[in-house]
Image (tube, coloured by chain):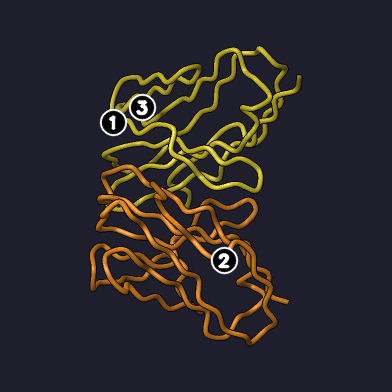
Chain colours: A orange, B yellow
Amino acid sequence: NAGVTQTPKFQVLKTGQSMTLQCAQDMNHNSMYWYRQDPGMGLRLIYYSASEGTTDKGEVPNGYNVSRLNKREFSLRLESAAPSQTSVYFCASSEGVQRELFFGSGTQLSVL
Amino acid sequence: KNEVEQSPQNLTAQEGEFITINCSYSVGISALHWLQQHPGGGIVSLFMLSSGKKKHGRLIATINIQEKHSSLHITASHPRDSAVYICAVTGNQFYFGTGTSLTVIP
């Protein structure tokens, strides 16, 4: 079982470039999430999708867009990367907010 | 605003020591999670609990709902336990602590 698969693992961008982080889960979960992790701070929610076809903003959505392509896939797009978006990004999924959370392996993103 | 507070932030222990990491929260919750993150690695769920105590190998998690407090204990610690341990709670969303960085020295 792959669980939550997240790509790429590493990425370096120049300011202003765009990129999409891909995430797929094979556990038939309804809920999917994108978090960023910065030193000294807890995981912060960027966007989430409670079910296929719905997306909602989290705590830090500015500069990001998401697409819930189908029940399996939830992508995160940076349209014009900024140095403040240098971070480690995690995709996660769960049956619902009351259930266990499963994480992808993370994407280390540097914006120069 | 910090809905979830962990202590200590950093912890160094000798191999074999008994370790306790604490988590306090301020929101109403339906469950509490303990997560483990190895350096450069992903995040895995260790426990999800809503009452009492759970045990898995050398790890024990307890929760006191009335006091809004949870502890993660590691018995007979080993260098492979070195990781960041994250407390998270679920109310209407997930709230995460900033983590406790544990180093176990041989």
- Depth check: A85 or B69 in front? A85
**Residue B29 appears in which quarter of the rendering?**
top left
CA separation in Å, label 3 and label 1: 13 Å
Q: Secondary structure at mark 1?
A: loop
Q: Which quadrant of the figure contains the C terminus of chain B? A: top right
Q: Residue at x 47, y 41 (%)?
A: B44
- Residue B50 is labelled as 1
The residue mark sitting in front, 3 or 1, is 1
At label 3, counting other C-alpha atoms closer than 10 Å, the crowd grade (few under 14, some 14-19, many 20 or more) is: few
CA separation in Å, label 2 and label 3: 42 Å
Kind of residue sitting beneath label 3: Glu
- Horizontally, residue B91 falls left or right of residue A58, namely left
Q: Which residue is mark 3?
A: B67
The residue mark sitting in front, 2 or 1, is 2
Q: Residue at x 65, y 53 (%)?
A: A39
Residue at mark 3 shares a chain with residue at mark 1: yes
Q: Secondary structure at mark 2?
A: loop
Q: Which residue is mark 2?
A: A8
**Residue A30 appears in which quarter of the rendering?**
bottom left
- Horizontally, residue B93 falls left or right of residue A110, namely left
- Horizontally, residue B90 falls left or right of residue B76, namely left
Q: Which percent across, then down, holds residue A86?
A: 64, 68
Q: Which percent across, then down, holds residue B97?
A: 50, 44
